[in-house]
Image (tube, rainbow, N blue to C red):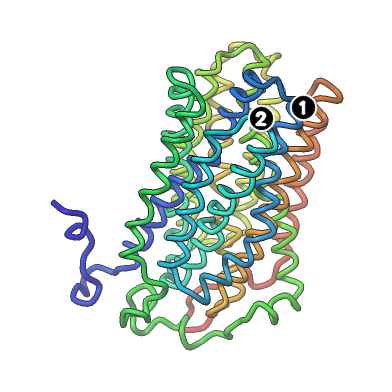
Amino acid sequence: MSLPSLIPNPSTNRKWFYGWAIVAICFVISFVVFGVRLSFSVFFVALIEEFGWSRADTASIFSISMIVFASTSTLAGLSLDRFGARWVVGVGAAFLGLGLVLSSQIQSIWQLAAAYGGVASLGITILGLGPLSSLISRWFYKRRGLAIGIAFAGTGVGSLMVTPGVEFLVRTLDWRQAYLVLAGFASALIPLTRWLHSSPEEIGLAPDGDPQNHNSSGQERWLLGKAVRTTSFWLVILAALGAIGPVRMLTVHQIAMFVDAGYDRAFAALVVGSAGAVTAFAFIILGALSDRIDRRLVYLLGSAALIAAMLIVHNLRSVGVGFQWIGFYIVLLGVGEGSRSSLVTAMASDLFPGNALGGINGAVGAAFGLGAAFFPWVAGYLFDLQGSYTTGLAIAGGAVVISTISLGLTSNSKLRENNGEPN
């Protein structure tokens, strides 16, 4: 059976809402993009072993990539608003593939900074969660949390499958070949753009497949310039700054933390992949739950889980080989990560509906990127200075608390259908 036959024609099939095809494509995109991003912890150890770079210097590559992400995320979102999903996704996949090919050829840290931190990261930005959540939010209103959660579950599945896979490639071949394999996956995204549509209206449909959907007619339509003049927008931005950064600190350093505690690197990669599996389910379950209750309460649950995961990884040496603690870490980290990006972007979409969702969630993505640039680098710097991750983890835990409080202070963050009016 050919791929085109697997995707119903949106112009002739009215029993099956085409928005779910958009979700499926976004799932594949997030699988590849975050498989690349989250496998950096494997490359982190391999690069240190081959080149003898310090942890701060090596972590700075990831931080540079996040700075690129932060500085271009809003532009990527605005490009989605202006040029549409097909063009944006195609360009993003091309940049990602090229950057990974160049990364496989590096001989110095500045070359990796340019190839991975620059070119590949621009592709990651264009294909990032902000643009993807904005695209999905145009297709869904009533089941927005579930739809975004399913798409973002690709990040967890990517971690589950790609991180151990990259570790295997690095161990059996080398890290250069691993980058080339990832480049092939990135290039395979380009043909998928054929089935992308920027909104349901583009093909004569309505959000959720419901012609009576009030999201199109009953709410104020926001532009980025108007949104930035509200308190809630900046509270969401503050929440985003502390949402992803602490998780990305673990993304970069957790395998090194496990190795420092005496665990085998292959086992550590398996732990990371297993947490990715939990993350995939958490995105879906927490997203669906947030469609029924206040998204802020669900985010609070995820924050508590993330802080508990940090406490466990900090005490790896003291808990020794107590694998029950590793199991707790896998579950808690998965729940914590599964509550971050999807809920923050869903809430931004709830707060500021309209045709400028790409730019608005692009700004949220920029805040994600700033946090993700800071925390991995500062954890590496403090480790080089102190020989411990204690202070870095404490700073990250404080950021999670501030993020949760900020999101809790937003007004009207959970919009629900009630006889056609949001409440």
Does dot 1 land on a helix, a strand or a loop? loop
- Dot 1 or dot 2, earlier in sequence: 2
Q: Is residue 226 depicted above or below 412 in this figure?
A: below
> Residue lying farthest bottom?
217
Q: Which mark is residue 423?
A: none
Query: Amino acid under label 1?
Result: Tyr
Do tag 1 and tag 2 residues touch (Cβ < 8 Å)? Answer: yes
Badge 1 crowding class, 10 Å Cα cut-off, few under 14, some 14 to 19, many 20 or more, is many
Q: Residue at x 49, y 57 (%)?
A: 92
18 or 287, nearer to the observer: 18
> Residue lying farthest left?
1
Viewed as shown, does residue 336 lie left or right of 97?
A: right
Which residue is the site of mark 1?
389
Query: Amino acid under label 2?
Result: His
Q: Is residue 359 depicted above or below 53 in this figure?
A: below
Which residue is the site of mark 2?
253
Q: Is residue 406 depicted above or below 115 in this figure?
A: below
Q: Residue at x 71, y 46 (%)?
A: 373
Residue 409 appears at what percent x and percent y? 74, 64
Q: Could you say which quadrant of the image residue 381 lies in? A: top right
Q: Could you say which quadrant of the image residue 255 lies in? A: top right
